[in-house]
Amino acid sequence: MRSTKRVPLAVCFIVLGVTAVVSAQTRIRFARGRTSATVNGSINRGAKRTFALGARSGQTFSGNVSSRNGCVKFTEGSTSNSYTTHPGDNVVSITNYCGRATSFVLTVSIN
């Protein structure tokens, strides 16, 4: 009887955990009059970080990510680092593909 009461509680924790992961984005804001922004941070091994930035229709943004060990790459797996935007929020993700945590520098520019 007790185990059936625990199942709904476990499901609630799983749903809440998934919701937190999906909504975990860092907003990149461009200073007034600027067309680029830089984000410094650290990322754990195997982890993915997602960033959102606003744009107008027809704009393009390019990004460059670097890390000390060269392990942090754009998650999209594209060799291109230039993207055509759509109006509103645009999302770009990076992943640490190596075996240890590392720092990174992400610079995005919008045209």
Image: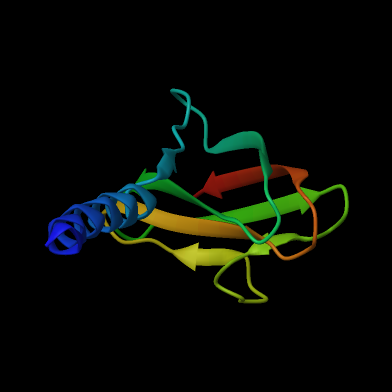
Q: Relative to residue 65, is residue 4 depicted above or below?
A: below
Quarter of image, res 5: bottom left
Res 60 visible: no
Q: Position of residue 23 (x, y in %)?
A: 32, 48
Seen as rendered, the residue at the extreme top is 32
Residue 47 x/y as whole percent: 60, 56
Compared across the picture, whether 18 is left or right of 99 comes to left
Q: Position of residue 76 (x, y in %)?
A: 55, 72
Query: In percent of the image, x 27 and y 51: which residue is there?
Result: 13
The residue under the point 78% across, 63% down is: 98
* x 87%, y 47%: residue: 68
- Of the 4 image quadrants, the one containing the N terminus is bottom left
The residue at 31%/61% (across/down) is: 86
Residue 111 sits above or below residue 99 on the image: above
Task: Judge left or right: residue 91 versus residue 93.
Answer: left
* Residue located farthest toward the right when viewing the structure as drawn: 69
Residue 8 in sight: yes
